[in-house]
């Protein structure tokens, strides 16, 4: 037996259990040691929007998906969410969520889209001119 910082004896393997949080699972264990999403090359930045695809398994389907994958699917089932929102909702690090979303993308369970960058949005002046033109009709 070893002692922790407070001098209390620790049982072997107890560093993987937290009295308040329960069993601890390291992020690399959730992703199988991977640090990058699948080979599709889709950018999964914090504002990328994730939508559930029609081919996603239902809540009762028994698939080879892990509990973290299923948690992300359930979060997307309610509404489209950003990668940051999914990480917060699943209480997982963003890096882990990116890898898991890469898996779900490869399996056809989710779709990822990016919001329109502000530089590509129409100029406010043009929009006002269109509105004024419509009012004049």
Image: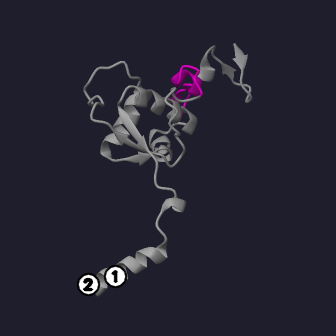
Q: Is residue 126 left or right of residue 6?
A: left
Badge 1 density bin: few <14, some 14–19, many ≥20, Cα 10 Å: few
Q: Is residue 27 above or below residue 12?
A: below
Q: Residue at x 54, y 25 (%)?
A: 25
Which quadrant is home to the C terminus? bottom left
Q: Where does residue 27 sit, x and y in percent of width and height?
A: 57, 28
The residue that label 1 is drawn on is: 133
Q: Relative to residue 92, is residue 52 drawn left or right?
A: left
Disc ID at residue 102: none
Residue at left offset 30%, top offset 87%: 136
**Residue closest to the eye, 122 or 4:** 122
Query: Regarding mark 1 in the picture, which secondary structure is present there?
Result: helix
Residue 46: x and y in percent read: 53, 46
Quarter of the rendering occupied by the N terminus: top right
Asked if the residues shown at circle 2 and circle 1 are in contact, with their CB atoms under 8 angstroms apart, the answer is: yes
Secondary structure of the residue carrying numbered label 2: loop
Determine crowd level at label 2: few under 14, some 14-19, many 20+ residues with C-alpha closer than 10 A.
few
Span shown in magenta: 17-35
State the residue lying farthest toward the bottom: 136
Quadrant in the rendering for residue 60: top left
> In the rendered view, would you say 7 is above or below 88?
above
Measured from the top left, where is residue 125 in percent x and y? 48, 77
Q: Is residue 33 magenta?
A: yes
Q: Nearer the viewer, residue 80 or 70?
A: 80
Residue 118 showing in the rendered view: yes
Q: Is residue 102 magenta?
A: no
Tell me, yes or no, if residue 21 can be seen here: no
Query: Pointer 2: what residue?
Result: 137
Compare residues 128 and 49 and report the one nearer the observer: 128
Left or right, 22 with respect to 55, comes to right
| Residue 12 drawn at (x, y percent) | 63, 13
């Amino acid at each position: 037996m070893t002692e922790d910082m407070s001098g209390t004896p620790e049982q072997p393997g107890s560093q993987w259990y937290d009295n308040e949080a329960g069993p601890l699972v390291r992020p690399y264990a959730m992703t199988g040691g991977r640090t990058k999403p699948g080979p599709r090359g889709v950018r999964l930045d914090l504002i990328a929007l994730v939508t559930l695809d029609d081919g996603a398994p239902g809540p009762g389907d028994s698939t080879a998906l892990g509990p973290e994958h299923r948690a992300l699917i359930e979060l997307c089932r309610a509404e489209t969410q950003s990668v940051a929102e999914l990480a917060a909702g699943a209480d997982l690090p963003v890096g882990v969520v990116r890898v898991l979303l890469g898996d779900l993308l490869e399996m056809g369970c989710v779709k990822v889209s990016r919001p329109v960058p502000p530089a590509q949005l129409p100029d406010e002046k043009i929009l006002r001119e269109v509105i004024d033109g419509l009012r004049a009709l």
